Structure formats: C-alpha cells, structure tokens
Image (cartoon, rainbow, N blue to C red):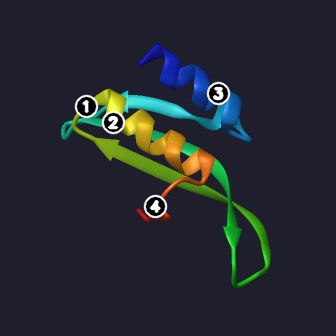
C-alpha cells in the first residue's frame, strides 16, 4: 500500500489535493487529475473520487486513472 501511495504522489499533477479516508462502505481516495477532453481538444483539470472495499483497490484505481490506463472513471 505504501508503494502505491508513493507512485500516486509521483504521478499526480496536484498531490497536495489528495485525500484518503475510510468510509462506512470501505475506502475513498479523492484527488484532482488532468484528463484529455476530446470535446475541447485539450487537457482539463477534474476532481475524481475512487471507492473500493479494500484500501489497496482504491489506490490502484486512482493510480490507473493517473496513468491513463483503462476506461475513463466517472463518479
């Protein structure tokens, strides 16, 4: 889990905006990312929330989004 957090800190454009907490349903990681917006033809800053039952899964989802791997995450 520590390794995932370090990787996220390296990849996030705004690491100071990230928050990681336990919720009633599991774990939640919130952060700001830069995503490609096809409609505008440029990158835009977006706030995203990643939830999972395990803390490692929430961090992994956030890391995948920061790396641009997989589908776009919508909350």
Residue 12 appears at what percent x and percent y?
A: 67, 38
> Residues under labels 3 and 4: Cα distance?
19 Å
Residue 49 appears at what percent x and percent y?
A: 45, 50
Label annotation for residue 6: none
Crowd rating for badge 1 (residues with CA inside 10 Å; few <14, some 14–19, many 20+):
few
> Residues under labels 4 and 1: Cα distance?
18 Å
> Residues under labels 2 and 4: Cα distance?
14 Å
> Residues under labels 2 and 3: Cα distance?
16 Å
Quadrant of the rendered image containing residue 57:
top left
As helix, strand or loop, the secondary structure at mark 4 comes to loop
As helix, strand or loop, the secondary structure at mark 1 comes to loop
Q: Is residue 9 left or right of residue 19?
A: right
Pointer 4 or 1: first along the chain: 1
Label annotation for residue 73: 4
- Asked whether disc 1 touches disc 3, contact meaning CB atoms under 8 Å apart, the reply is no
Q: Is residue 32 above or below residue 29?
A: below
Task: Report the residue marked by disc 3.
Answer: 9
Crowd rating for badge 3 (residues with CA inside 10 Å; few <14, some 14–19, many 20+):
some
- Asked whether disc 4 touches disc 1, contact meaning CB atoms under 8 Å apart, the reply is no
- Asked whether disc 2 touches disc 3, contact meaning CB atoms under 8 Å apart, the reply is no
Q: Is residue 51 left or right of residue 69?
A: left
Pointer 2 or 3: first along the chain: 3
Q: Is residue 6 left or right of residue 64?
A: right
> Residues under labels 2 and 1: Cα distance?
5 Å
As helix, strand or loop, the secondary structure at mark 2 comes to helix
Of residues 72 and 14, the one nearer the viewer is 72
Of residues 46 and 41, the one nearer the viewer is 41
Label annotation for residue 57: 2
Task: Report the residue marked by disc 1.
Answer: 54
- Asked whether disc 2 touches disc 1, contact meaning CB atoms under 8 Å apart, the reply is yes
């Amino acid at each position: 889990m520590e390794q995932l957090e370090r990787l996220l800190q390296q990849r996030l454009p705004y690491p100071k905006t990230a928050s990681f907490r336990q919720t009633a349903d599991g774990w939640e990681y919130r952060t700001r990312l830069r995503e490609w917006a096809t409609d505008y033809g440029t990158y835009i800053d977006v706030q995203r929330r990643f939830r999972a039952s395990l803390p490692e899964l929430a961090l992994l989802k956030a890391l995948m989004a920061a790396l641009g791997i997989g589908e776009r995450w919508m909350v």
